Image (spheres, rainbow, N blue to C red):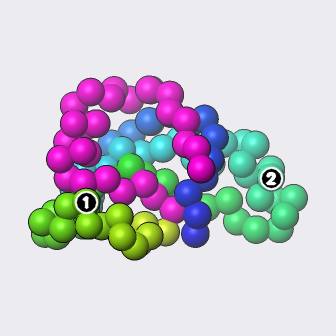
Amino acid sequence: MKTPEGIYKIDDRNPRSSFHLALHVSYPSDEDKARAAERGVPAGSEIMIHGIRNGLGWIGAFHRMHDWTIGCIAVTDEEIEELWRVIPNGTPIEIRP
């Protein structure tokens, strides 16, 4: 239920997402899985960088007023379109607090 922190890669993309475009983050790593197992909790999966839910793009930056992603990273539709264009699969990313 939280966004993971660390170094990952963009390893896939989904143009047919329920959200306006989605870039998949290579989470969980083997280290993430081991850390979760030590704590007895699931590591989670399917972390994406994505736009607003389809049909609600008019909300724009107001989506930032409430944490609604359940671990993903949400940006505006315009922002995800730019990221989609300039970030190829395999690009390393660092997620910080």
Q: Residue 49, percent across and down? A: 38, 49
Quadrant placement of the N terminus: bottom right
Q: Residue 5, percent across and down? A: 62, 47
- Boundaries of the magenta span: 71-97
Q: Residue 61, percent across and down? A: 25, 60
Horizontally, is 93 left or right of 77 in the view? Answer: right
**Mark 1 Cα shell of 10 Å, populated few (<14), some (14-19), many (≥20):** some
Mark 1, residue position:
61
Check if residue 82 falls in the magenta segment: yes
> Circle 1 — which element?
helix
Q: Could you tell which of marks 2 and 1 lies nearer the N-terminus?
A: 2
> Circle 2 — which element?
helix
Mark 2, residue position:
35
Identify the residue at image location x=18%, y=68%. 59
The quadrant in which residue 24 appears is top left
Query: Vertically, is 42 above or below 10?
Result: below
Query: Vertically, is 49 above or below 7?
Result: below
Residue type at numbered disc 1: Ala
Q: Is residue 16 visible?
A: no
Check if residue 75 falls in the magenta segment: yes
How far is mark 2 from mark 1, CA to CA?
A: 34 Å
Identify the residue at image location x=36%, y=70%. 65
Query: Vertically, is 93 above or below 97?
Result: above
